[in-house]
Amino acid sequence: TPDKFWSTWNEQYVEKQNKLLNKTVIGRQVTKQDRDIISLFEKEGEDNTPSYRFIGFAFEKYIILTMNNELYILDQIAAREKIIYEKVRRNYYSSNKDSQLMLLPDVINLTTKEMGIFRDNKDLFLKAGILVDEFGDNTVKITQVPSFCIELNTEEIFMETLREINTVARIETREIESKFLATIAEKVAMKTDLALNGLEVDEIMRSLLKLDNPFVGSYGRPIAIKMSRADIEKKFSRR
């Protein structure tokens, strides 16, 4: 019967996993390939985070996993955005800034209007660890950025953030700051490479599960959708 088939298959799969785990940790150094294999197995929670099992990807962008007897489909860009937002927020309000010197500064030409927007919001960039100075008429130079931006196109991130904050009404400072931080997080997340293997998924999940409300993003947008085992079985008329 189908139930017996899947029960037997699962037992054989678990046995194979255990053999591979023992083989990769006993007698030799664990390789990157080993870690990718191990990352497919159930992860023990760290720092009181839930354990989970990575299943695979759907349409490249979505991560499929199980956790607490529920199936999750995770938007990895939204997940990275939340992780980065927390990093940007902590950096913004910290006296010990994460701000690294760029090997080659970005020199950016602005319009007169864009230069005015920059001058009005220069302190926001500085507090976020992005050091931008005027460098002649309607020209700025970016010399330092947070570590998570160092490998990205910082000119695009700066310009897109500058245009976005210009759309924010001049309201309370805290709301302007919140919009600014959310915009940086969104732009950085969009330009970060997608996870391609279990090891990279593990990195996302370890960071995400440490956060409050890990599956709720900016403005209440969902980061993941989930279905319980009971919900799935109902779909197949098993309940």
Image (cartoon, grey):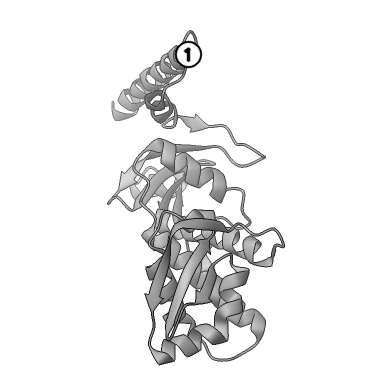
Quadrant for the N terminus, please. top left
| Residue 23: % across, % down | 43, 12
- Residue 133 image point, x, y percent: 52, 75
Measured as percent of width and height from the top left, residue 72 is found at 44, 49
Residue farthest to the top?
27
Q: Residue furthest front?
A: 136
Q: Seen from this angle, which residue lies furthest right?
A: 95
* Picture layout, residue 140 above or below residue 208: below
Count numbered badges in the picture.
1
Q: Quadrant of the C terminus?
A: top left
Say which amino acid is labelled 1: Asn
Residue at the spot x=41%, y=67% of the render? 106
Residue 173 visible in the picture: yes
Where 1 falls versus 212 (above or below)?
A: above
Dot 1 surroundings within 10 Å: few (below 14), some, or many (20 or more)? few
Q: Which residue in the protein does label 1 denote?
A: 22
Q: Against 8, is 169 above or below?
A: below
Find residue 224 and report its image quarter.
Answer: bottom left
**Residue drawn at the location 45% of the way across and 82% of the way down:** 136
Does residue 239 appear in the picture of this structure?
no
221 relative to 2 in the view: left or right: right
Front position in the image: 120 or 201: 120
Q: Position of residue 208 (x, y in %)?
A: 55, 50
Tag 1 secondary structure? helix
The front one of 40 and 32 is 32
- Along the line of sight, the residue nearer the viewer: 168 or 111: 111
Question: Residue at position x 43%, y 42% from top?
Answer: 201
Q: Is residue 97 left or right of residue 108?
A: right
Choose top left, top right, bottom left or bottom right for residue 85.
bottom right
